[in-house]
Amino acid sequence: MIQSQQVAQQNTDQKIKLEVLDTNGNKVEEIEIDNIFASPNQSVLWYYVRWYLSSQRAGTRNTKTISDVRGGGRKPWQQKHTGRARQGSIRNPHWVGGAVAHGPHPKDFSYKINRKEKVEALRTAIALKYQEGKLKIVSAFNFNQPKTKTALETIRNIDAYPLLVITNGSNKNVYLSFRNIPLTQVVPVEELNAYHIANFDYSVFERSAFMKVVERIQKAKSNKQEVQR
């Protein structure tokens, strides 16, 4: 157990190099970062995706009980001497137009998840894309005007589709350019989460946006090490 922990620590201490492309698909530079993508924790990623989808549920479905259904206040016939089964109300669940027995009611499906688990899920999602060769870094998306044709050319040049585009802050021209292309989405790095990454085949970062994510993961990692000490 101790040996496996030492191996994992050695892997995280190593440096990795990542290519940075331009919108034409040409390599413009190479960045070196700590190997923050070692040992991805897929169970945390699964837990995060389950939490995210549960939080999106409105939980507003509702069915009427016998006290909510209109009518049925009078006993339909007397208790005895009719030859028919006794009935108390025509709004009982077994009557047509009656109430629903044990039906769904408004419910809050959300639950809590720790901030560290959110960061670990994001790290794992990006790490899996890196291992699959589906992590792309572009120097910048410099779109002077919204143009879908330019976005399509960029997709072909970097060979990534379907894709999630992560920009450094809101970029209206980039958003409008990719908006009409199926199976694509543009997300500012401030709104990025693990579900976004896991939901698309390719993740395409702007260089500055990617460095912000790396900084966030490294900060969480250093805080964890300080707590362990």
Image (tube, helix red, strand yellow):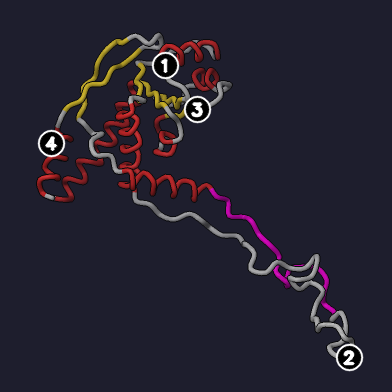
Q: Classify residue 95 by image quadrant.
A: bottom right
Callout 2: SS: loop
Q: For the residue labelled by badge 4, is the local secondary structure a helix, a strand or a loop?
A: helix
**Measured Cα–Cα span from mark 3 to mark 1:** 16 Å
Rendered location of residue 85, percent (x, y): 81, 82
Q: Nearer the viewer, mark 3 or mark 2?
A: 2
Dot 3: what SS?
strand
Residue on which disc 3 sits: 185
The residue tagged with tag 1: helix, strand or loop?
loop
Q: Is residue 191 visible?
A: no
Kind of residue at disc 1: Asp
Mark 4 Cα shell of 10 Å, populated few (<14), some (14-19), many (≥20): few
Location of mark 4 (residue): 10
Who comes first in sequence, dot 4 or dot 1? 4
- State the residue position of label 2: 81
Taking the image as shown, residue 47 lies to the left or right of residue 146, namely left
Label 3 Cα crowd, 10 Å radius (few <14 / some 14-19 / many 20+): some
Q: Is residue 221 visible?
A: yes
Tell me the CA gap for discs 4 and 2.
87 Å
Relative to 32, does residue 103 appear above or below in the rendering? below
- Amino acid type for the residue under numbered disc 4: Gln
Mark 2 Cα within 10 Å, few/some/many (few <14, many 20+)?
few
Instruction: Give the residues drawn in magenta, as a range.
Output: 57-74
Chain-order first, disc 3 or disc 2:
2
Q: Residue at x 52, y 20 (%)?
A: 178
- Identify which residue, 59 or 41, lies in the foreground: 41
Q: Earlier in the sequence, mark 3 or mark 4?
A: 4
Specify which label sits upstream in the sequence, 2 or 1.
Answer: 2
Q: Do the residues bearing badges 4 and 2 touch, measured as CB atoms within 8 Å?
A: no
Q: Is residue 217 magenta?
A: no
Q: Are marks 4 and 1 in contact (CB under 8 Å)?
A: no
